[in-house]
Image (cartoon, rainbow, N blue to C red):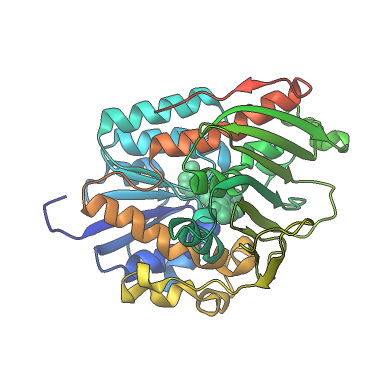
Amino acid sequence: MENGARLRVAVVGLGFGGSFPEIYRAHPDVAEVALCDTNAERLAAFAGEHGFAARYARLDDLLADGRWDAVHLVTPIPLHARQAVAVLQAGKHCACTVPAATSLDDLRALVAAQRESGRNYMMMETAVYTYHYLMAAAMRDAGELGALQFLRGAHYQDMEGWPPYWAGLPPMHYATHAVAPLLALADARAVRVHCFGSGSMREELRAPYGNPFPVETAIFQLSRPGLAAEVTRSLFETARDYVESFTALGGKASLEWHLENELPVVFRLSDRTPDGWGRPCAVERVAPPSRNDLLPPELHRFTHHSVLMDQQSLHGSVLHGGAHHGSHPHLVHEFVRSIVERRPPAIDAVRAADWTAAGICAHASAMRGGEAVEVPSFG
Ligand SMILES: NC(=O)c1ccc[n+]([C@@H]2O[C@H](COP(=O)([O-])OP(=O)(O)OC[C@H]3O[C@@H](n4cnc5c(N)ncnc54)[C@H](O)[C@@H]3O)[C@@H](O)[C@H]2O)c1
């Protein structure tokens, strides 16, 4: 890419990935957008409906075409690490949906490929660009939370009937939506974990990954001294509506978000001197702002639910919580601007590996009855 030139970006995988091409196309630093999907019918239907001319049925053909500067992978989980390494080795910048990988070896290979290529890698973690997360981070930065005292995250989702690679997946192998907001708020990584599996699952779900647990719950020791975080995940046979939520307990104020479509609750501790039975705490439901101030005007319309909700062809998971609470344009903007400004993106390969490894090690702990497992550092 020449200095000052606008980017040419390809989006690979048009299920959930279908929410991104329009956002790239609207971005002022993007010149052209290509689509790639091995499902010919889906590719033709999506490209036709939305007017995208450049189409590829195979990732290899896209990678061999020197026209494209960057590739955003939104393909099935087992392909993420291998495809991301291939994109980087082809000399292109890579964005990839979560999780970055499902093994520590693949995370090491990814970090090595990013370093060797000198290209940008960004894990496109929606949970750290939601209205709720951006509000919590702003409260932290303004000193409103006081000292962070504890963090808790939960991601409950029933994956019955989803594509076959989901069936029986260890819950902590898809933990980044619950882990990432906690580690990002603490600006820390997980160094050690104890995790327990819970519940029982029918045999056909236990077989594919040798995982017996529908639910896993973990407590992480963080690299920031004195701070711990707890994460619970469920994927199967558990009656809980979908949510990707977090709690941040601070010394002065705390924020809890429990239900997908309800506002988060902010607790503010009075600074009145205690008179013997604790200090009063003000409790308020707060509507987080959409933070369009962080985006170029061309992307403002994508932080609102209605733009994408109107489309019949839209992927189911996007409908949950309406485009993941405004996060998609922020992800696109950060990936694109990091390339234009020739700097690492906010969720670079090391950060992506640190966040993803926390869940991989948690599942390893659960399989050993809750034994402590050290989480390696990728920095
Ligand atoms: N909040 C989030 O960040 C979030 C939400 C939903 C899904 N995801 C992630 O997005 C990924 C895709 O999810 P989905 O539900 O759309 O999956 P999916 O399996 O429904 O769709 C994947 C798409 O990729 C295509 N594809 C498969 N192999 C390909 C290949 N080798 N080359 C090109 N295209 C290929 C398929 O034809 C399909 O259209 C998953 O890995 C999931 O982890 C993230």
Give the percent coordinates (x, y) of residue 346: 37, 48
Above-or-below relation of 131 to 348: below
Q: Is residue 345 visible?
A: yes
Res. 169 image quadrant: top right
Give the percent coordinates (x, y) of residue 200: 88, 37
Q: Is residue 41 visible?
A: no
State the residue in front, 296 or 136: 136
Residue 169 shown left or right of residue 89 in the figure: right
Res. 261 image quadrant: bottom right
What residue is drawn where x is 39% and y is 37%?
Answer: 349
What residue is drawn where x is 24% and y is 57%?
Answer: 7
Quadrant showing the C terminus = top left
Residue 365 shown left or right of residue 43 in the figure: right
State the residue in front, 75 or 133: 133
Q: How many marks?
A: 0
Above-or-below relation of 286 to 277: below
Give the percent coordinates (x, y) of residue 22: 40, 69
Give the percent coordinates (x, y) of residue 295: 35, 69
What residue is drawn where x is 65% and y is 55%?
Answer: 244
Res. 319 image quadrant: bottom right
What residue is drawn where x is 35% and y is 64%?
Answer: 24
State the residue in front, 286 or 21: 286
